[in-house]
Amino acid sequence: MEKVTGIGGFFFRVKNADALNAWYEQHLGIRQVAERDEDGSWWQEAGPTVFASESASDQAGGPDYAWRINFRVRDLEAMVAQLRAAGAAVEVDDTIYPNGRFAHLRDPEGNRIELWEPAGADLVRPPD
């Protein structure tokens, strides 16, 4: 069976795309979409990715939000410190889970972002 090889893009509607794209680049290091296709896209590092649907009562960010995004980070403490220094309100989950540690924040338009420092089985790529 042919399989997809990863997430090729994540697109969502916002009020001010230019400002929000700049915020994601400045604070999370996600390269903005280039003006020309020839200039390339943001490349993420290989690693675990969760793809899961959630009911409205689950963690999708509340009834006003239809999605949330989870970004893998190498060093959760360093990322949290960087974001807080820039004025972002970041909540770190005190629980250390078998699959890692998590923190939560919202972008300037209120969209929920989850940060994940993987651990345990998620640090080893399973066989295809």
Image (tube, rainbow, N blue to C red):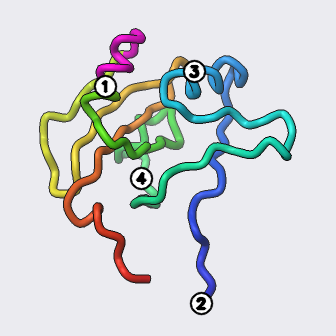
Magenta part mainly helix, strand or loop?
Answer: helix
Question: What is the distance, in whole Å, between disc 3 and disc 4 at their CAs?
Answer: 29 Å
Q: Looking at the image, which residue is at 50% across and 29% down?
A: 111
Q: Position of residue 28 (x, y in %)?
A: 49, 30
The circle on residue 23 is 3
Ranked by sequence position, the earlier of labels 2 and 4 is 2
Q: Amino acid at mark 3?
A: Trp
The circle on residue 14 is none
Q: Position of residue 106 (x, y in %)?
A: 44, 25
Q: Amino acid at mark 1?
A: Val
Instruction: Tell me the quarter of the picture where residue 4 sits.
Output: bottom right
Q: Position of residue 125 (x, y in %)?
A: 35, 71
- Asked if labels 3 and 1 touch by Cβ distance under 8 angstroms, the answer is no
Ranked by sequence position, the earlier of labels 3 and 4 is 3
- Between label 2 and label 4, give the one nearer the viewer: 2
Q: Position of residue 48 (x, y in %)?
A: 39, 60
Q: Which residue is mark 1?
A: 80
Q: Which residue is mark 2?
A: 1
Q: Of helix, strand and loop, which one carries label 1?
A: helix
- Asked if labels 1 and 2 touch by Cβ distance under 8 angstroms, the answer is no
First to last magenta residue range:
80-88
What is the quadrant of the N terminus in the image?
A: bottom right
Mark 1 burial class by Cα count in 10 Å: few <14, some 14-19, many 20+: many
Q: Of helix, strand and loop, which one carries label 2?
A: loop
Q: Of helix, strand and loop, which one carries label 3?
A: helix
Q: Which residue is mark 4?
A: 55
Question: What is the distance, in whole Å, between disc 4 and disc 1 at their CAs?
Answer: 28 Å
Mark 2 burial class by Cα count in 10 Å: few <14, some 14-19, many 20+: few
